[in-house]
Image (cartoon, rainbow, N blue to C red):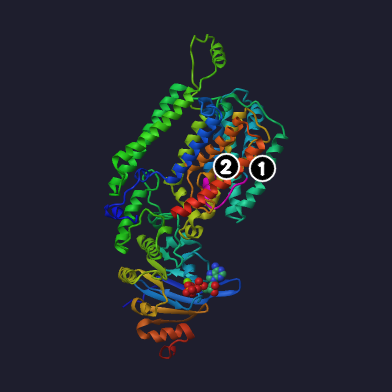
């Protein structure tokens, strides 16, 4: 800045990331994620970045990532939810009982196609109700969220226990299990089609945002920068799809499938798994939550309330009811996460979701959600969940002892927040 | 001259409010007519902000009644006040620091597209328009308001109150953080709004400013109303005596 040549330039020169308007925080997280992946890949002699492991990593992340998107809203409004893991258990118990007990007793027999959707609706409704109740305690009765959900951590874990009398319930419905990950995937062709559609949607979004800015005479990035962004999204999306497609269904599984149809597996035939339904669900949740955060009044009010609760109230926002809505959304997402988690296990067990509250909060915080409120992104939280899961499974693959894994994860959380604080100070961001 | 023969725009009657034993406002009555600016004066802690917060819906009075256009008004929260076309610039500005100027200006009343999503581009364009009128030097449209100077924040708060075509405007020390040029612009704005027939409550510690901009001045001391005077009938010294000693000038005391 101080040297003469800089002051001669009519406009300050921007570096490439500023021109592309990519948030440096996001870059930092992506960088950290890449480093984690490369290091583990080196330590495991290339086993970490195989299609198989990427596939597993992805499906293991989904449940926590779904809840983390809701935790962003909770933390942005200066609250916390310590009960998400227990809420997940209650929802899971309720859904397990519904499909193995209640529905069969009213005449919907095993394998009936209505079982899975009804069970899922029940689970989401339970999540929404409990979440709304938590929100009511926080918003209308002014009990701190920390206390309400700390109580909830105990209450809902054990309500779940009572409902099932402590028993493991399974196997769950066959269709229901399709949402668990490997039990339900799109297959190669459909995955490619979806990938291409996603790329088109991303390009369209980038382009229409540009057109809208031009129509209001606002400054825009150079055209090449827009194309670079489109290119990056295309490579990421299609690369991800290609990796998941490259994970091939084992021959014996294929043999069984063909046998069931009364055919014989042709010589040299192979098939990739493609995109799991659970990951598709996460993508839908992420897109919806991002739209809510950025494009709806609800999202505005969430961020405004987090930035200054008094100002939000004085601006006519009903902050109490807003709190109910936020916790209800969190509850619904716990229900969804419960679907994915129990479907992946193929049964309901009482310890399902144990310690998930910590993983979810860590994912949101590592993803840049500020505990002071007002700041946070959905994509950050998902990336945070992915980083946490990579660390954990990477260490497991390397053979790190379980207690030491937890020590590392705990330390990473604290260090991530420290780095974030330093970053915010440096950039003057709040 | 303000015509005070019709029904007042706002009539606050016998308002009292206390906080845990402290009578912040003690049986105060003031009214406001269309096209009139009423100044509220008083020492720090006299109860000015508390009084007007009863009108803006931030507080609810323990006793007393508020009439808007002659009708009894129930103002239980800020949303109710907005329904009566009452807009407020709070002393604390009440901005969400993490959002930009446009988001703050439209907070609670976002412009939406036909699909029901917030229309950021339209809101930014409107914000540029009104800021161009109020503070042409203002350029930081993309930055969160935490990155603005005190005066810039103040102009955002003023823009928010003016944009939505209030009929009753409450300004709690609107020029406290402004430079001389910006203060002059606010003064001109007040005169323009007054010509348009708005009623304005103006809280200001500067008695010269009050004498210049206001038609009447209400002086408070320790939560009580010392008196309401027409500014043309008193000197600045009279006003200061009312604020400090709590005495109405003798020639009006009768
Ligand atoms: N929320 C509150 N809780 C308790 N006491 C309060 C509250 N708000 C105001 N008060 C008290 O009420 C009295 C009047 O305060 P108020 O803010 O109305 O003063 P003011 O006339 O606006 O003063 P200033 O010129 O400093 O802005 C003060 O004694 C103050 O301490
Ligand atoms: Mg005050």
Q: Is residue A376 visible?
A: yes
Viewed as shown, does residue B6 lie left or right of B22? left
> Where residue A155 sits in the image (x, y, percent)?
68, 44
- Measured as percent of width and height from the top left, residue B92 is found at 46, 66
Position of residue A351 in the picture relative to residue B48 (left or right) = right
Mark 2 vs 1, N-terminal side: 1
Q: Nearer the viewer, residue B213 or A51?
A: A51
Check the image and report above or below for A242 versus B191: above
Whole-percent x and y of residue A217? 28, 49
Q: Which residue is mark 2?
A: A360
Q: In the displayed structure, would residue A314 be above or below residue B251?
A: above
Residue lying at 45% horizontally and 27% vertically, measured from the top left: A241
Q: In the image, which residues are magenta?
A: A71-82
Please report, as a chain letter, where disc 2 is located.
Answer: A
**In which quadrant will I find the N terminus of chain A?**
bottom left
Q: Is residue B16 magenta?
A: no
Q: Residue furthest right?
A: A165
Q: Which residue is mark 1?
A: A156
- Queried on whether the Cβ of the residue with tag 1 lies below 8 angstroms from ligand 1, the answer reads no
Q: Are marks 2 and 1 on the same chain?
A: yes
Q: Chain of mark 1?
A: A
């Amino acid at each position: 800045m101080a040297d003469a040549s800089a002051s001669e330039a009519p406009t300050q020169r921007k570096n490439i990331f500023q021109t592309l308007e990519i948030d440096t925080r996001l870059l930092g997280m992506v960088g950290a994620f890449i480093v984690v992946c490369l290091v583990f890949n080196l330590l495991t002699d290339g086993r970490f970045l195989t299609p198989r492991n990427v596939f597993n990593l992805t499906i293991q992340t989904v449940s926590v990532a779904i809840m983390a998107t809701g935790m962003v809203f909770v933390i942005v409004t200066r609250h916390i939810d310590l009960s998400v893991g227990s809420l997940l258990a209650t929802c899971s118990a309720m859904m397990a009982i519904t499909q193995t007990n209640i529905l069969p007793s009213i005449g919907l027999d095993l394998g009936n196609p209505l079982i899975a959707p009804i069970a899922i609706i029940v689970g989401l409704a339970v999540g929404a109700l409990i979440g709304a109740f938590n929100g009511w305690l926080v918003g209308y009765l002014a009990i701190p969220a920390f206390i309400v959900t700390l109580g909830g951590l105990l209450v809902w874990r054990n309500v779940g226990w009572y409902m099932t009398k402590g028993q493991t319930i399974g196997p769950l419905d066959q269709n229901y299990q399709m949402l668990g990950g490997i039990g339900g995937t799109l297959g190669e062709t459909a995955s490619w089609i979806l990938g291409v559609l996603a790329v088109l949607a991303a390009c369209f979004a980038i382009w229409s945002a540009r057109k809208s800015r031009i129509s209001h005479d606002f400054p825009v990035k150079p055209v090449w920068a827009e194309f670079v962004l489109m290119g990056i999204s295309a490579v990421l999306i299609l690369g991800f799809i290609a990796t998941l497609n490259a994970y091939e269904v084992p021959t014996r599984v294929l043999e069984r499938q063909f046998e069931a149809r009364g055919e014989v597996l042709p010589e040299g035939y192979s098939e990739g798994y493609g995109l799991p339904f659970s990951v598709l669900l996460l993508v839908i949740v992420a897109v919806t939550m991002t739209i809510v955060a950025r494009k709806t009044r609800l999202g505005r009010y969430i961020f405004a309330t987090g930035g200054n609760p008094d100002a939000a109230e004085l601006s006519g926002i009903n902050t109490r009811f807003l709190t109910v809505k936020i916790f209800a959304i969190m509850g619904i997402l716990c229900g969804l996460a419960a679907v994915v988690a129990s479907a992946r296990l193929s049964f309901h067990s009482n310890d399902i979701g144990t310690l998930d509250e910590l993983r979810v909060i860590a994912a949101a915080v590592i993803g840049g959600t500020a505990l002071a409120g007002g700041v946070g992104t959905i994509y950050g939280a998902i990336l945070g969940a992915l980083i946490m899961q990579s660390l954990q499974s990477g260490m497991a693959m390397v053979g790190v002892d379980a207690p030491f894994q937890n020590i590392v994860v705990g330390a990473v959380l604290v260090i991530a927040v420290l780095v974030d604080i330093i970053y915010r100070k440096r950039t003057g961001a709040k | 001259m303000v015509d005070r023969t019709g029904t007042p725009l706002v009539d606050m009657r016998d308002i009292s409010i206390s906080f845990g034993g402290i009578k912040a406002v003690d049986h105060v009555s003031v009214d406001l007519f269309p096209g009139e600016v009423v100044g509220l004066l008083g020492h720090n802690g006299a109860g000015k902000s508390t009084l007007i917060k009863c009108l803006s819906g931030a507080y609810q009075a323990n006793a007393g009644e508020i009439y808007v256009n002659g009708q009894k008004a129930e103002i239980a929260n800020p949303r109710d006040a907005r329904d009566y076309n009452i807009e407020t610039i709070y002393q604390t500005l009440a901005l969400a620091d993490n959002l930009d100027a446009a988001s703050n200006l439209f907070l609670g009343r976002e412009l939406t597209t036909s699909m029901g999503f917030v229309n950021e581009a339209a809101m930014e364009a409107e914000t540029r328009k009104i800021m161009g009128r109020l503070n042409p030097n203002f350029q930081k449209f993309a930055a969160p308001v935490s990155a603005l100077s005190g005066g810039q924040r103040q102009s955002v708060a003023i823009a928010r109150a003016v944009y939505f075509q209030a009929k009753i405007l409450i300004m709690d020390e609107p020029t406290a953080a402004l430079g001389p040029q910006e203060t002059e612009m606010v003064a001109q704005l007040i005169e323009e709004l007054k010509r348009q027939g708005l009623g304005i409550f103006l809280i200001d510690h500067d008695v010269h400013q009050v004498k210049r901009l206001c038609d009447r001045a209400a002086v408070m001391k320790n939560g009580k109303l010392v008196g309401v005077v027409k500014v043309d009938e008193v000197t600045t010294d009279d006003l200061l005596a009312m604020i400090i000693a709590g005495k109405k000038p003798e020639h009006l005391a009768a």
